[in-house]
Image (spheres, rainbow, N blue to C red):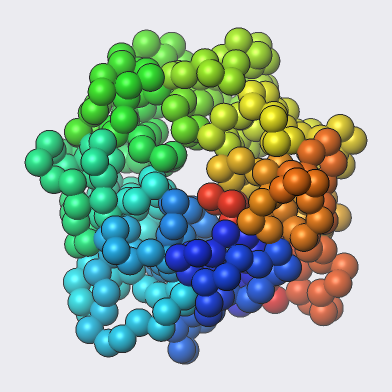
Amino acid sequence: MATIYAIGSNGSGQLGIGHKEDVSVPKQVLFDPDTQINGVTQIKAGGNHTLLLASGILYCSGDHTSGACGLLPSHKVLESHFHLVRSNADETISRVAFCAASWESSIIVQRDQNGQATQVYTFGTGHKGELGLEEPIFRSSKAQLVNNFPPEGLEIVDLAASVSHIVAVLSNGEVYGWGNGRKGQLGQPEEVIYEPRKITGVDFKVVRAVCGREFTYLVGESQLGQHVVLGSEKWDVRSTAPQSVAGWKDAGATWGSIFVLLKDGKLLSWGRDDHGQLAPPGLPPLSQIAIGSEHALGLTTDGKVLAWGWGEHGNCGPSTTDGDVKGKWNTIASSQYLPPGSKISSIGAGCATSWVCVST
């Protein structure tokens, strides 16, 4: 069984802690009555909503007005709680393999009857093509199927999104994207890409994608270390990238910087650092990372959750310097303070939000 704790920005109830005030000390996340959470696999955040994926079931908390939390059930929803995302008023969405969030929309990949991740649904608001549903459709609270994608015989192996663009990695190593393509973050620059379009010119098999505000970071197989940054060079994310990321374990991006966790626990980072977003010196070995809009979390090998970067909303803990945790880190949670048999199993980060999952 998992218990989830959250800190940070909460003006729309996106933390799901029962109220709409920012918090800098971890508070337990609340669900509808009789909900038992096991196996949290993803926590993804939009501007004012949060998606939580556990055991193939999708939950959401936060701003309902954009449609990004899906259809509301026929019964009254508890405000500022996580609730099941529904495909209609009384049917929950299950068999979810991946989820992602743009500023005001949600994207999910559902497994088909054969267990393949082949069904892409979107809901919410997207004025720059984020819904991937052809030009005239800008808002839908009902989950809409993205037609004719992925191509027949292929499945989706990774999904990523940022403020206004979405990227999907396919089982053959190809990458497709939709949404805002003005800066070249989806390949050949185009103002709005309304439907999934193949990103061309990548000369290696991609297995992982992450998205910054105006760029996309694609990574190949770990032993080869191939990688490429597409899009805006505003924060030198292309020119300062290392030649190789061989031995990578995980990757993430803030709006303006990139992070790569290596299998040996070392964290590489480059790009924007004006709020201390990049990895601080002396960082201990990490087993997991979670990267938010302008802050980062790391789970150490001995069970501590470290936070650094822009923390104005309390998302890096209560101790900041003018809202920043720069050149150092705060410890926001630790397994050593948990009861016997409990441990911190995973972490998450969003738009000035931070998440700690405890398993028992």
Q: Position of residue 88 (x, y in %)?
A: 19, 71
345 left or right of 97 in image: right
Above or below, 163 against 72 in this view is above
Residue shown at the point (47%, 19%) measured from the top left: 232
Q: Position of residue 61 (x, y in %)?
A: 43, 68
Residue shown at the point (67%, 44%) measured from the top left: 310
305 left or right of 31 in image: right
In depth, the one of 267 and 67 nearer the eye is 67
In depth, the one of 341 and 300 nearer the eye is 300
Q: Position of residue 27 (x, y in %)?
A: 66, 73
109 left or right of 211 in image: left
The outermost residue toward the front is: 322
Above or below, 189 against 109 in this view is above
Q: Quadrant of residue 58?
A: bottom left
Residue shown at the point (64%, 16%) measured from the top left: 241
Above or below, 338 against 253 in this view is below
Residue shown at the point (59%, 45%) measured from the top left: 292
Is residue 323 at all visible to an observer of this figure?
yes
Is residue 157 at all visible to an observer of this figure?
no
The outermost residue toward the left is: 136
Q: Position of residue 156 (x, y in %)?
A: 35, 40
